[in-house]
């Protein structure tokens, strides 16, 4: 089962975006799914994760602004991003611990 991220784009600071992570099969194949991002010249970092039980974790830099949601019926995990800042500009990836890195989706936040 593969995970594919989509939904990136160009948005002004203060705006919102919704990223989607779609599984090619059952999302129950993964107990944990994480959203990661990599900004130019920086290391990839974990932004948010969600366990099959619904437990979530967030990086301090996005707490209160981003929400990760798992919709089992759609085999999709969403990353709802509000109050976006220029420093949120990055390529965003979704991945499970046992999975591989996909292509990611680019989010660009203009000031």
Image (cartoon, grey):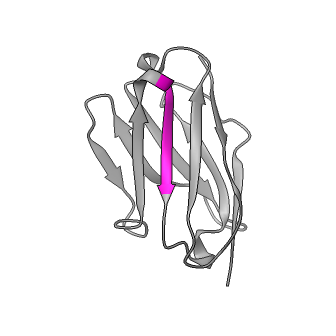
Q: Considering the image in quadrants, where does the N terminus appear? A: top right
Q: Residue at x 56, y 14 (%)?
A: 25
Locate residue 28, reporting x and y percent.
41, 18
From the viewer's perspective, tell me whether residue 26 is left or right of residue 64: right
Residue 17 vs 108, above or below: the answer is above
Residue 110 vs 6, above or below: the answer is below
Q: Considering the image in quadrants, where does the C terminus appear? A: bottom right
Residue 91 visible in image: yes
Residue 46 vs 40, above or below: the answer is above
The quarter holding residue 40 reads bottom right
First to last magenta residue range: 74-80
Locate residue 6, reporting x and y percent.
67, 43
Residue 96 or residue 63, whichever sits in front: 63
Q: Residue at x 62, y 19 (%)?
A: 24
Locate residue 99, reporting x and y percent.
56, 26
Residue 44 visible in image: no
Q: Residue at x 56, y 77 (%)?
A: 85
Numbered-mark total: 0
The quarter holding residue 23 reads top right
From the viewer's perspective, tell me whether residue 105 is left or right of residue 58: right
- Asked whether 96 falls inside the magenta stretch, the response is no
From the viewer's perspective, tell me whether residue 111 is left or right of residue 46: right
Residue 89 vs 51, above or below: the answer is below
Q: Residue at x 50, y 24 (%)?
A: 75
Residue furthest bottom as drawn: 111
The rendered magenta stretch, by its main secondary structure, is classed as strand
Locate residue 70, reporting x and y percent.
40, 35
């Amino acid at each position: 089962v593969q995970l594919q991220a989509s939904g990136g784009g160009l948005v002004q600071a203060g705006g919102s975006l919704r990223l989607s992570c779609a599984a090619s099969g059952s999302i129950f194949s993964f107990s944990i799914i994480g959203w990661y991002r990599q900004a130019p010249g920086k290391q990839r970092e974990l932004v948010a994760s969600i366990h099959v039980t619904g437990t979530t974790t967030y990086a301090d830099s996005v707490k209160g602004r981003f929400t990760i949601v798992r919709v089992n019926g759609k085999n999709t995990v969403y990353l709802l991003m509000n109050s976006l800042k220029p420093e949120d500009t990055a390529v965003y990836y979704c991945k499970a611990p046992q999975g591989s890195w996909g292509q990611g989706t680019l989010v660009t936040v203009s000031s």
